[in-house]
Structures are given as C-alpha cells and as structure tokens.
Image: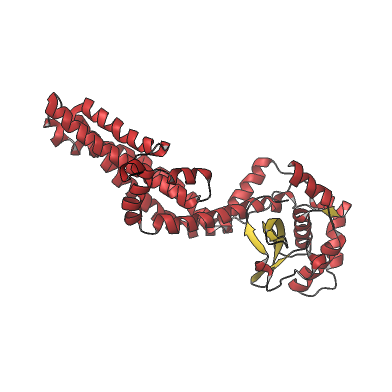
Amino acid sequence: MNGMEELFDRNLVTWLLLAMVAFSMYRGFRCGASGSVKQLVFFLISAVISVAAIALAALLAAKASPHVQMWLVDRNLSNPGPEASAWSQFGYTALAGLRDLPLLRFAALFLVVHSIVRALTGIVTKAFASVVSVPFAVVPSGGAVGKSAGGLIGATLGAGRALLLTAVLFAYCAIFPSAPMSDYIQQSGLYREVAAQVIRPATGGLLNERLPVFAKAVSGELGELWQKRYDVIDANLPEDIAAAAVEVTKDAAGEEAKAKALYDWVGSRIVYDDDKASLYVENGVWREQNPEATFRTRKGVCIDYARLYAAMARAAGLEVHVVTGLGYDGRGGYGSHAWNEVRIGERWAPLDCTWANTGNWFDTPSFADTHIKQGGLTA
C-alpha cells in the first residue's frame, strides 16, 4: 500500500475522524463565513477555558486534599458493623477510603471542583464568545465567497474536533494498552499519523508515560478501597473466634509475636478447599463464606484464610488488612491469590497463611518475588 492508502484506510476510526471534518465543513458551508466564525471562536474559547478549568481544579484539589483528610481524621469514623444497612456500610467504606487513600481523595476532589468550575464558566464562555465574534458579524455569509469561506472555517473547526478526539483515543490506548479496542484504534493510519505528528510532540511524556502510571496508582487504590469492605462485613466476630484469637496470642509479647502466633495457628488449622477452588475455576461458581464458616469448617481458599486471619488479628488488637493480587504458581506463571499485611511498629509486614504448610511465608525478604498486589476479589 502506498502512503495515501495507508493514511486513509477502511478503519472505522479513520472514517470517524474524516466524518467529523467533513460534517463540520458542510455545516460551515451552510452557515456561511459569519456563522462559522462564531462556532470556531466558541470552540477555541471553550478549549482554552476547559484547559484552564482542569488546571485550576487540579490546583484547588491538591490544596484542599490535606485539609479534607484532617477533617475526616477528626471525625473518628466508627465501623458500622455487618448488621448496619448497606448505605451505612457504603458510606463508611467511601469515607474511610477518602481518608486513607491520597490519590482517590485527590480524584474525588478534582471531579467535584471541576464540575463547579465548569458550571460557573459555562455561561461566561458563551457570553465571551458572543462578544468576541461580534466584529466578524460583518463577514458575508451568503454568496459563493461567503459559503466557501464558511466551508474552510468549518473544516478548520472539524480538524480541531478530530484532533481532540485523537487525543482522547491516545490517552485511552496509553491507559489500556492491552484492551482489544486499543489494537484496533492503533491500526488506523490517520490516527497513527496525527498521534505521531501532533499529539506526542505536543504532550511529551504526559499522556503515554505519566498518565498510565497515574491510572495504575489510582487503580491500586481502588483495589484497596474494595478490600476495605472486609473491615465492615467481618467486624463482629462470634465470641468463640474472638476467644480463640486471645488464647492463641496470650503468651506472645509484642505485635510481631502475636502476628506470628496467629499465622501459625491459621496456617496449620485450616485446610485448603480444592472442591471450592475447582468449582470457581471450572464453572465460575463462587461460594462466599465468612470467617465464622472458615473457623467452623476448618476449610477455605486463600481469601478465606486471609479474612479469618484478619478477623482474629483484630480481635487480638492488631492492625491488619486483606491483600488481593497474584501469587506465583510454581510453574512459571501467576494466579489469583489473597494474603495479609499486619502492622508491626511503623511498617506493614506481609504474610501468607495459605502457603504456610509449604514453608515460612511470614514477613520473608523474598515475599514480593512471589506476590503481586492488585485489586478485586480473588478465589
């Protein structure tokens, strides 16, 4: 294929970009020069104000973030417990996430501030665009000259819109490089040319380097927020489990000794439930079970080990949370997995009760070599 055929291929993205230019040109021809100028001026002013609004919202969100965190800390949020309504549990989880997760807090504040700024600037944008376009009202709209000029202005406006769409698609491909649509988008010759000649030079490494890192960090925090729900649903333990936790740790002195005693107990008392794991992997059927069921049946999969350990650790006065992600499968790959992190002094120590019968997986130096943190529910 020659260069022109590669640029204008049969890809739907290519035709969408061309259609935006063609439609804007057609509207420009119909409206004439005067009407097209007004649309172009409004588009340019809107673009400038949108960029300014994003920058202002980011600045204000960054300034407000530590104050919001301190306000939430001062509220002394209390766990509503598993018997509370779904709205109470959701509210606690959301507020706790905003308090503990800085990127999530910034993103939430940014959305709120940006919405307010855009609402306030919307009327100003229209009024300013109308004033600026007044001098162009004398430009003739009718006749061959006026309509031709309108068509050219409309094409320019369409090119701007197509460029904006290309930037959005470029950001999407940067954040989700493995998504099926990313491959298809990048097969568009026109998209590749605009991205290479305009988007990359204009944005530097912002979109294709920094944005994916930021998106990954936000995704990680959302995973942590998802895991916080266990703080609510596993908050109230039956007395026998709480008593067992106290009994197991009664002779342990200090946080590390208590955490290790519970690791040994859960790792040696609970048996891996192969039937439950197979049912999920082969048939997609997930059987949810709480720490009480794991304690009673002495069976479970990794998330059940982790939830029971977390519940018992809290009963023993330890700070702990459930971590989900990927675990090394011993065959060169990774599979869905869950484990814990317990607070010892000023650090969070990782431990994996599920693997306890295969060796020591309590705060080992090589723990990160076989465990990769992610978000979401795992089997």
Give residue 34's quadrant in the image: top left
The residue lying furthest to the front in this view is 1
Picture coordinates of residue 272 (x, y %)? 83, 56
Left or right relative to 294: residue 25: left
Picture coordinates of residue 336 (x, y %)? 69, 54
Q: Is residue 114 visible?
A: no
Q: How many marks?
A: 0
Which one is in front, 374 or 3?
Answer: 3
Left or right relative to 102: residue 47: left
Give residue 241's quadrant in the image: bottom right
Q: Is residue 146 above or below residue 180?
A: above
Q: Is residue 372 above or below residue 118?
A: below
Picture coordinates of residue 319 (x, y %)? 70, 64
| Placement of the N terminus among the 4 image quadrants | top left
* Residue under the point 21% across and 28% down: 29
Here the colouring is secondary structure
Left or right relative to 224: residue 199: left
Q: Is residue 58 visible?
A: yes
Picture coordinates of residue 259 (x, y %)? 76, 68
* Residue under the point 68% across and 72% down: 366
